Image (cartoon, rainbow, N blue to C red):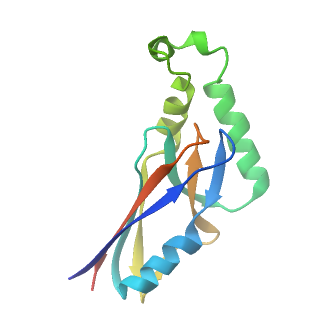
Amino acid sequence: MKSLTEYLTFNTKTRISFLNITPDIEKLVYKSKIRDGLCLVNAMHITASVFINDNESGLHHDYEKWLEALAPHEPISQYKHNDTGEDNADAHLKRQVMGREVVVAITNGKLDFGPWEQIFYGEFDGKRQKRVLVKLIGE
């Protein structure tokens, strides 16, 4: 069995961002030479997410608006977590809703997506460096 482990690093310019990382993952699938297997993509920070959805800017705007309604950033005093000196309790909650990782099948050397599916990195407490793990296994 073959495997490949790589780390992607992101440092977004804004607090909340959605980045389409599908091309980065496709390059790693190609590099791995795996024809049939699985690809795990995992956010390695508790205020970031990896998820699959449509690459449509209106949807990304809707996500940001919806998540802010569920867990507004301000006032930061509304969250017990922020009593520790942090100001990112909302980012932890947003990550919980959007998820930690995705697993995508690799078939014939390519990510086996449904229509319109793409892999996204969701950042909820940006402006600092964070990593994403990509682990591929298969034959």
Q: Is 76 displayed left or right of 107 in the figure?
A: right
Establish if 108 lies above or below 40: below
Q: Where in the figure is residue 61, as x and y percent of width and height?
A: 76, 45
Locate residue 73: give its quadrant.
Answer: top right
| Viewer-proximal residue among 86 and 123 | 86
Q: Is residue 114 at least partly visible in the picture?
A: no
The structure residue drawn at horizontal position 44% and vertical position 56%, both measured from the top left corner, is 132
Toward the right, the furthest residue is 58
Location of the N terminus (image quadrant): bottom left
Q: How many numbered circles does the render carry?
A: 0
| Viewer-proximal residue among 129 and 20 | 129
Q: Is 119 displayed left or right of 139 in the figure?
A: right
Establish if 79 lies above or below 67: above
The structure residue drawn at horizontal position 42% and vertical position 89%, both measured from the top left corner, is 108
Establish if 48 lies above or below 65: below
Q: Where in the figure is residue 71, as x and y percent of width and height?
A: 60, 25
Q: Is residue 30 at least partly visible in the picture?
A: yes
The structure residue drawn at horizontal position 42% and vertical position 84%, both measured from the top left corner, is 31
The structure residue drawn at horizontal position 60% and vertical position 41%, both measured from the top left corner, is 126
Q: Is 42 displayed left or right of 128 in the figure?
A: left
Location of the C terminus (image quadrant): bottom left
Q: Where in the figure is residue 38, as x and y percent of width and height?
A: 34, 72
Establish if 27 lies above or below 41: below
Q: Is 41 displayed left or right of 139 in the figure?
A: right
| Viewer-proximal residue among 97 and 7 | 7
Q: Where in the figure is residue 99, as x and y percent of width and height?
A: 47, 45
Toward the left, the furthest residue is 1
